[in-house]
Image: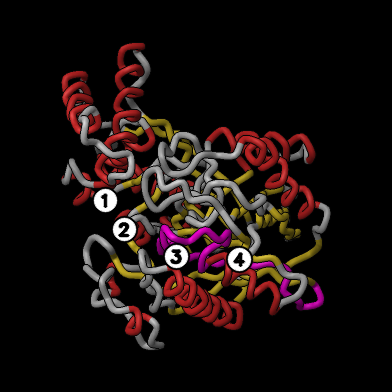
């Protein structure tokens, strides 16, 4: 096979608003702790087909942004087609806000947004110009000291001094990822040209007081490995993470920045281990994409929406209401979301959610991607039933459509993941996304690895 790898800087100017951590915080960036990058791998199979994977140090990806990146890359490399281009992000909360659908979670800078797709696309275009013969190897290695499940293991209140001890791990590591999957691509001279690092944990160490731009622990770790291996380019692939926080989150600013380097080094250590232990895998390649219509909750009818609208307005339309109050700020984005849904229903717009499900095979390795923040149970069930020897379920792939809650959280109809998330985006609440995603992933897995089932 052939491969080309490149990084293109996507760091914004200081002064843009940052993504995440709560509604209407108006977090304005003040400095750049670490640059942000779009890092691309362009791979050509022995049969001549071309494939592109791009990983970005960003918090989210608009579907329109992904479409524009694909359009630019295909125009520059005519033999490519859009479905052979995968664009994903790390979901860092220390990157610029770029999606206006995330109401209240940072206001996008329009100049940056106009420039951004061309910069992301350039990473792939540059990688295409660097293609050479490569070999592919893979490894699964321990990675146990980074995450804690925020829903099924109350570990967010662990003292930071405990988290920073080398042997710390949560009470229930089985509710988190305990392994990382590493792929490496070597040139004919044996030098490392590119690598993929797959791991599932919400990539957020810093806090709402943080106003520094950086790629959080994945971005810091990847850049550290690239410096240790000059000429190489690494891509972070975000696994099931929607219910897994890092061991340090929502702490004070100085504590967070200290923990950032510790957790980044733990991830970098796992990547180094994987790069060292990786063994050759077959290099045949194929891609399959499916489009699914995700079902939504039937009780979100006009009566329900108007009831919620009245609830939010009652909180906001009081003489004593304060725009600094957390409850008011929460009600404000929910009111915007419910008003959008009411308009959609009145106009006859569809109430399902369309999602592109992506599958890429590289020998024994399989990347299954969807545009959601995917919970661990969905990833775990897919892994347990997949035919692929080396499966990876990638979140935030080719778009950002909010949370994909597991069955337990879907049953909690007023949970943050099941209800608040849809209000942020102004989209319908998902009804059965756990089963729908597993089914879609396994259908693609079966097509890519049909010989494994025979």
Q: Earlier in the sequence, mark 3 or mark 1?
A: 3
**Nearer the viewer's eye, disc 1 or disc 2?**
2
**Secondary structure of residue under mark 3:** loop
Mark 2 lies on residue: 243
Q: Judge whether 402 appears above or below 210 on screen.
A: above
Mark 1 lies on residue: 406
Q: Judge whether 151 appears above or below 96 on screen.
A: below
Residue at mark 4 to residue at mark 3: CA–CA distance: 12 Å
Q: Earlier in the sequence, mark 3 or mark 2?
A: 3
Whether the residues at callouts 1 and 2 have beta carbons within 8 Å, the answer is yes
Mark 3 lies on residue: 206
**Nearer the viewer's eye, disc 4 or disc 2?**
4
**Nearer the viewer's eye, disc 1 or disc 4?**
4
Q: Residue at x 27, y 63 (%)?
A: 150
Q: Earlier in the sequence, mark 4 or mark 2?
A: 4
Q: Which mark is residue 33?
A: 4
**Secondary structure of residue under mark 4:** loop
Whether the residues at callouts 4 and 3 have beta carbons within 8 Å, the answer is no
Residue at mark 3 to residue at mark 2: CA–CA distance: 17 Å
**Nearer the viewer's eye, disc 3 or disc 1?**
3
Q: Residue at x 43, y 79 (%)?
A: 142
**Residue 357 vs residue 151: left or right?**
right
Whether the residues at callouts 4 and 2 have beta carbons within 8 Å, the answer is no
Q: Residue at x 64, y 67 (%)?
A: 195
Residue 310, quarter of picture: top left
Residue 423 seen from this side:
yes
């Amino acid at each position: 096979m052939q491969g080309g790898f490149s990084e293109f800087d996507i760091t914004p100017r200081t002064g843009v608003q940052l993504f995440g951590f709560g509604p209407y915080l108006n977090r304005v960036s003040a400095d750049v702790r670490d640059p942000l990058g779009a890092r691309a791998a362009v791979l050509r199979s022995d049969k001549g087909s071309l494939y592109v994977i791009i990983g970005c140090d960003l918090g989210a990806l608009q579907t329109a942004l992904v479409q524009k990146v694909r359009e630019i890359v295909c125009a520059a490399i005519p033999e490519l087609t859009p479905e052979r281009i995968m664009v994903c992000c790390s979901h860092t909360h220390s990157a610029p806000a770029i999606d206006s659908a995330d109401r209240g979670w940072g206001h996008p800078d329009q100049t940056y947004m106009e420039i951004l797709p061309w910069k992301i696309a350039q990473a792939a275009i540059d990688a295409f110009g660097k293609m050479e013969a490569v070999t592919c190897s893979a490894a699964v290695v321990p990675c146990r000291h980074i995450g804690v499940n925020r829903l099924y293991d109350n570990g967010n209140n662990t003292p930071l001094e405990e988290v920073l001890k080398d042997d710390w791990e949560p009470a229930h590591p089985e509710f988190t990822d305990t392994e990382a999957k590493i792929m490496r691509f070597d040139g004919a001279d044996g030098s490392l040209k590119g690598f993929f690092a797959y791991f599932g944990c919400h990539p957020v160490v810093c806090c709402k007081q943080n106003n520094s731009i950086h790629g959080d622990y994945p971005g810091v770790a990847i850049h550290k490995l690239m410096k240790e291996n000059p000429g190489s380019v690494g891509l972070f692939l975000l696994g099931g993470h929607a219910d897994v926080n890092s061991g340090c989150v929502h702490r004070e600013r100085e504590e967070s920045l200290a923990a950032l380097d510790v957790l980044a080094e733990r991830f970098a250590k796992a990547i180094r281990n994987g790069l060292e232990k990786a063994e050759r895998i077959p290099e045949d390649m194929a891609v399959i994409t499916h489009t699914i219509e995700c079902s939504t909750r039937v009780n979100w009818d006009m009566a329900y929406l108007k009831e919620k609208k009245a609830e939010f307005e009652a909180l906001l339309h009081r003489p004593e209401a304060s725009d600094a109050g957390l409850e008011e700020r929460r009600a404000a984005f929910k009111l915007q979301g419910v008003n959008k849904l009411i308009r959609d229903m009145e106009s006859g717009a569809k109430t399902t959610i369309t999602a592109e499900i992506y599958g890429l095979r590289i020998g024994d390795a399989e990347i299954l991607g969807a545009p959601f923040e995917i919970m661990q149970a969905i990833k775990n069930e897919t892994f347990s039933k997949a035919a692929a020897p080396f499966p990876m379920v990638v979140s935030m792939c080719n778009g950002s459509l909010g949370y994909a809650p597991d069955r337990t959280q879907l049953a909690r109809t007023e949970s943050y993941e099941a209800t608040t998330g849809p209000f942020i985006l102004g989209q319908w609440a998902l009804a059965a996304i756990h089963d729908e995603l597993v089914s879609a992933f396994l259908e693609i897995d079966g097509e890519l690895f049909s010989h494994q089932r025979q």
